[in-house]
Image: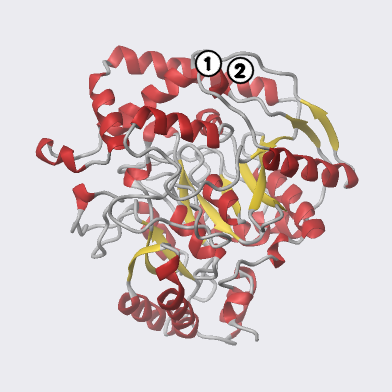
Amino acid sequence: MFELHHLSAVDQLDWLRRGEISPRELVDHYLARIERLDGDLGAFVTVTPEQARQRAEELASSPGRAAALWGLPLADKDLTARAGVPTGYGSRAFSGYVPEASDELADALDATGGISLGKTNAPEFGMPSYTESLVAPPARTPWDTARGAGGSSGGAAVAVSAGLLPIAPGSDGGGSVRIPAAATGLVGLKPSRGRVPAGTGLDGLGGLVVPGPLARSVADAALLLDALVGAGEYDHATRAPSWDGGAYLNAAVRGEGRFQLGVTRWSPWSDEYEIAPHPESDDALALALRELDALGHGIEDLPDPGAEPGYAAAFRTVWQSGAAGIPVEEERLDLLEPLTRWLVDEGRKLTAVDLGRAISWLRDFERRTIRAFSGYDAIITPTLAMTPRPIGWYDHDDPERNFAQQCAYTPWTSFVNVVGLPAITLPVHQIADGLPMGVQLIGRPGREDVLLAIGAQLERRLHWDRRHPPQW
């Protein structure tokens, strides 16, 4: 039986603009699905039905149907403040906090005509690559609810994958859009640094973090990317040079071009941590390469960039320094989870010289990596080294082991944030028990359009937009 969530986000927007459905009807549809299904999934930590319905009625009575996402339901990741809505940052230390002002991303989404249905589940301050906090049930991949959805945008990914939202914004500081997208069978895009301003607050981390879309199709991801890019001026933000190639949705719909692709399984984490990709990870990459070859793209192995013995220490230093800036009073530090407390404590030991050296090292790494990738239109890697991890797999008592486990699971995502390049994960593969596995494409600076075009070509061959988990 047909239901509204069976439509793509692009088609839902078209129906809204033509008056086939009203914003209130669509909001009510998704609120009903959240109420019925989310208890087993952990996508939301707060649902705001009254505010959402009021917003839907206000939009219906306004003349602004041309707004980029007019009437589409969305939700804010619980690291994004929205005035009047509880915002806990996934932490007991912020229990009961209700901000008086919204972050710029929330205001930008309002400017697009979107309707927030609440706050999606996120781990404590977005630090882990999984979403299993002490303040909410874990975010579970709808494909196997015994397994986690990844993080830190885990709740947003679950909501889109299970049809509780048409699309959702996430934020990505080390893979936090791409990791949960891969674990839930979605398209997830991290824009170039500066393409979508990251705003202010807890999400900066020295330029590592950027908002990005989670969607079931490449076109839906492009729709949300266009909205984020075009949402207006952001205070306190630096933009990359304007993109003049038209709407990103056009690139996703056309899906044109033949490109030169470099293939690598290299990870800068491998000098300090054991990186051992599972066969399912290699299978996803092999499938993508066969399809790309059949499409006529040039494919060659990327020469090994060589050892990067300073990467792990430099990245940890920046991550720890970001944690040290979390505004938690001394008497509430014991409320932090062991991983966060370790990051905070180590970060507070750092000197300005320590941080300066780490940033300088990572900037040199950025230049070397972009130079090594410059001969290709895109670089392709697996997205994850393993299948989605079982709930409880991470060691919550030993933070250093926990950090090593995260590096082993996600060895190819964080360095893309360091170098500031755009990247997209595509759910190309399903293993025998239905779990999704993805590949990552890394583009040249500012060339999200190439990633969307390649993604659209693969989607037309593999039809992942037609795959749905049991809750669908």
Residue at position x 71%, y 18% in the image: 304
Toward the viewer: 235 or 316? 316
Mark 1 surroundings within 10 Å by alpha-carbon count, few (fewer than 14), some (14 through 19), many (20 or more): few
Give the amino acid at mark 2: Arg
- Classify 272 as above or below 339: above
- Which mark, residue 364? 1
Q: Is residue 376 left or right of residue 410?
A: right
Place of residue 303 in the rendered image (x, y in percent of width and height, measured from the top left): 75, 19
Place of residue 441 in the rendered image (x, y in percent of width and height, measured from the top left): 68, 40
Q: Dot 1 lies on which element?
A: helix
Q: Is residue 373 left or right of residue 65?
A: right
Q: Which residue is mark 2?
A: 368
Toward the viewer: 201 or 387? 387
Res 24 seen here: yes
Contact, mark 2 vs mark 1 (Cβ under 8 Å):
yes
> Quadrant location of the N terminus?
bottom right
Q: How many marks?
A: 2
> Quadrant location of the C terminus?
bottom right
Residue 385: quadrant of the picture = top right
Res 247 seen here: no
The structure's colour scheme is secondary structure
Place of residue 157 in the rendered image (x, y in percent of width and height, measured from the top left): 51, 57
Residue at position x 36%, y 52% in the image: 104
Mark 2 surroundings within 10 Å by alpha-carbon count, few (fewer than 14), some (14 through 19), many (20 or more): some
Place of residue 459 in the rendered image (x, y in percent of width and height, measured from the top left): 75, 57
